[in-house]
Amino acid sequence: MVSRYNRQELLSFVGVKGQRKLSESTVTVFGMGALGTVAAEILARSGVGKLVVVDRDVVELTDLQRQLMYDESDIGKPKASAAAAKLEKINSEIKIVPVAADADYKNIMAVVGKPDVILDCTDNLETRFLINEYCLKNKLAWVHAAAIRESSQLMVFDFRNGGNNLPCFACVFGASSAAETCDTVGVLASATIAVAAMQATEALKILVGKENEKVKGLLRLNAWQNKMTEIAVKKNKKCCSCGNKGTRTAHALINPQYEYLSGKKGSKMVSLCGRNSYQIKGNAVDLEKLKKRLQRIGEKVADFGECISFRNITLFRDGRALIKAGSAEEAKASYSSYVGS
C-alpha cells in the first residue's frame, strides 16, 4: 500500500527517514488566524505527529477573507476548536490538541510544554516577546511570521545547541510598536498565505534535521510587487532578553531579565488588533449557571461548549472575556455588569 506521504517521501531532503521524524514531532502553533490556519494545515498534511493549536479569539465574518480553514458555519466559535475539528478531518492519523486560551507568564508552560518547534502566527508583540523569552529560557526553536497590507516577514530563532549566541526577537524588534493592524489598514490574503507556507517550510527543515538550510536573517516579502529580500541581523549586546543585562558566561546567560516571562510586563486587558474588541481576564466562571441566569432574564445565549456568547460578550470558562466596545471603560463596565469585577 502506498503511503499517504509518498509524494513527500520522494523528496531527497525528506525521504522515509525524514517522514518518520515528522511523525514523531510536536509543533505548537500560536494564533489560528490567517497565518496559523495555513501553516497548521500544511504541517497536518505533512504528517507532523502532534499539533497543538493555540488561540484566544473566536471566528468573525471579516476573518473569512483570508483565514482559509473557516467557513460561515464557524462564526462565533473559538478558533482553536474550530481549527482542530477541520484538521482532524484532514488527517486522522495525527494528534490535534486545541487550546482556547490566552498564553501569559502564568500558563505558558502548561500551554506550550517543550515542542520541537513553535510557530508564531500571532497578531501582537506582547505574545511574541513572551514566546521569545520562553524559548530562550528553555532552549527551543521558533519561527516568527507576520503580515500587514501587501507585505510580510519571516525569521527563524533557534536557541537549541548553543543558539543563545544568536540574535533573539527582542534584539531585532525590541523598539517596535504596533501602530498599524490588519483591521485598520487591511491585509492581502496572498501575503498571509505566502509567508505562512514559507513559515511551515522552515519548521519542516528543523523537524527533518536540515537546520543548516533554514533562513539566516530577516526575510521580507511584498506579494503585490513580487519582491523578496533577506536582511542580515546581529545580536544586540544590550538586549533586555539576551544581552549584557544578565551575567554572561562562554555558553549561557545567567540571571537574564525575562520581563514578560516573569510577569513584570504584560496586560490584564488587551485591545484585540484594532477592531473595537477588548480581552479582559477574570476568575473562572460556571458557564452553565450563568447561561441559565441570563436566559431567565430573556437574554439570547449561544453555547459553543468552551464559551458562551451573548450581547457583545464572548465568555470562556476561565473568566476570560472578549468584549466588543467603543472604549476600554465601556468593556470593563459590560464585564462587571454580567460577570462581576
Image (tube, rainbow, N blue to C red):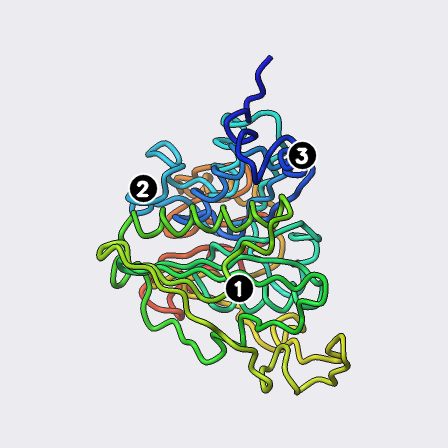
Please tell me which of labels 3 and 1 falls first in the chain.
Answer: 3
- Percent across and percent down for residue 153 are 40, 61
Neighbor class of circle 3 (other Cα within 10 Å; few <14, some 14-19, many 20+) is few
Q: Are marks 2 and 3 in contact (CB under 8 Å)?
A: no
To which residue does mark 2 refer?
A: 64
Mark 2 residue element: helix
Q: Residue at x 38, y 71 (%)?
A: 178
> Residue 340 or 131: which is nearer the viewer?
131
Q: Is residue 77 left or right of residue 305?
A: left
Neighbor class of circle 2 (other Cα within 10 Å; few <14, some 14-19, many 20+) is some
Please tell me which of labels 1 and 2 falls first in the chain.
Answer: 2
- In the image, residue 302 sits, relative to residue 113, either above or below, namely above
- Percent across and percent down for residue 203 are 55, 49
| Distance CA(mark 2)–CA(mark 3) | 37 Å
Task: Give amino acid for label 2.
Answer: Leu
Q: Residue at x 45, y 80 (%)?
A: 175
> Residue 90 or 230: which is nearer the viewer?
230
Mark 3 residue element: helix
Question: Total of numbered circles in the picture?
Answer: 3
Residue 281: quadrant of the picture: bottom right
Q: Are marks 3 and 1 in contact (CB under 8 Å)?
A: no
- Percent across and percent down for residue 111 are 65, 52
> Residue 59 or 10: which is nearer the viewer?
10
Task: Give amino acid for label 1.
Answer: Thr
- Does the image show residue 35? yes
To which residue does mark 1 refer?
A: 127
Q: Nearer the viewer, mark 3 or mark 1?
A: 3
| Distance CA(mark 3)–CA(mark 1) | 34 Å
To which residue does mark 3 refer?
A: 17
Q: Residue at x 49, y 46 (%)?
A: 201
